[in-house]
Structures are given as C-alpha cells and as structure tokens.
Amino acid sequence: MQALHTLESKFLLLDQENIDTDQIIPARFLTKTDKNGFGQELFYDWRYTADGHKREDVELNRRQAEGLQILVAGTNFGCGSSREHAVWALRDYGFRVVIAPSIGDIFKSNALKNGVLPIEIASDVLAVLRQQRDSVLSIDVLQQIFGVLGRETYSFTLDAFAKTCLLQGVDALGYLMQKEAQIYAFEARRPLC
C-alpha cells in the first residue's frame, strides 16, 4: 500500500446523496478476490449504457476526471452492504480521498484498511466545495487538515492508529509485521506453560 502524507488534486464532485456500495461497484462484478481491476467497473451503471457504451454526459467519463484523486459527494456516501470491493474500485480508479458530510461506518472502516482516507465534513463546507469545483484541494494527513489551495483550511478527525497506517502505507497486518522482531523477543521472554 502506498503511504499518504499530503495530496494535492482537483476533485470530482458527485453531487448526490445516498450513494451506496452497489452503485459504486455493482454486485455482478464481485467475482474476483484480487484488489486490482475493479476501477473499470466503478459506477458502471452510471458510466455505461445497457449495451456497454460509455456515456458522454457522465462526469467520470470526461477527460477532466482523469487522474483525479479526490472524490467529493453528498451525505451518506458508501451506505449499503459491507462491500470492500467498493473501496477497491475507488482505489483502483485512482481515488485516495473521499469527502462527504457523512460516510457509512463500514465503508469508512474498509476505506482506512485499504489506504483510502474518508473525510467527513459539515454541510456548509460541502456548499463551499460546490462553488469551487475546479479548484485544487490540498490534504495533509499529519496535520489532519484540508482545503482549497490558498484559502481557508478545515480540520478532520482521524483515529490515531488509522493515521499511523496511512502515513506508513500499511494495513493492520502490515503494521504488526513491522513489529515482528519485538513480538518474537516478547515471546522468547515468556516462560512456556
């Protein structure tokens, strides 16, 4: 997993509420267990016609959306089933940060485990972002702040362990593996039962 310290990117605004995990990655694409290759199916039913042609009227299909690493959405993003594939699809497409007034708890947990930073914001901050949709956002994980470059910054909350994992580019298992020598040393000092 790639570490996330700071990030500067324009953002994609999906200005709707209740975007659920089935919209993010439809269930019919959940046939792989590898985390790669899901980006092409991200928001598939929105991005493609029934016969598989790209819809030109969809923001994600426009050239301006290529390379964007920040997704901004309405309230209740990532609600629905506990589908880790939804985070895999976002990450494989290139998104490292999701910003919304509220984010589903299970989605939030899955995001952090897979190197995607979920940031919950107040509705008035979303209103500001709507007005600045062509701006570059700056994210600083260490300081837990973000904002439009050169303008006001906003703070966000982040669990200390999740922050450490993001900064080090590891998941929970990777974090433990870094402590392998210490674990073996501890075990060696313990008497056998």
Image (cartoon, rainbow, N blue to C red):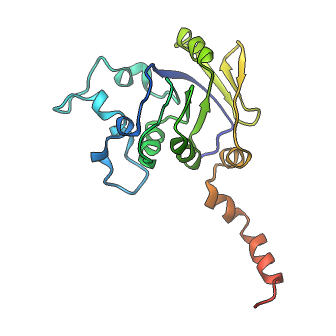
Q: Position of residue 112 (x, y in %)?
A: 59, 45
Asked if 21 appears above or below 187 in the picture, the reply is above
- In this view, the residue farthest toward the top is 131
Judge whether residue 1 can be spotted in this image: no
From the viewer's perspective, tell me whether residue 126 is left or right of residue 144: left
Q: Nearer the viewer, residue 154 or 91?
A: 154
On the question of residue 129 being in view, the answer is yes
Q: Position of residue 60 (x, y in %)?
A: 38, 25
| Horizontal side of residue 101 vs 30, given as left or right | right
From this view, report whether residue 118 is shown above or below residue 130: below
The residue sitting at the bottom extreme is: 193
Of residues 149 and 98, the one drawn nearer to the viewer in this rendering = 98
Q: Position of residue 59 (x, y in %)?
A: 38, 20
Count all numbered tags in the image, as a single digit.
0
Residue 65: image quadrant is top left
Whole-percent x, y for residue 164 in the image: 72, 48
User: Considering the image in quadrants, where does the C terminus appear?
Assistant: bottom right
- With 96 as the anchor, is 158 left or right in this view? right
Q: Closest to the observer: 150 or 122?
A: 122
Q: Residue furthest right?
A: 189
Q: Is residue 87 left or right of residue 38?
A: right
Which quadrant of the figure has residue 3?
top right
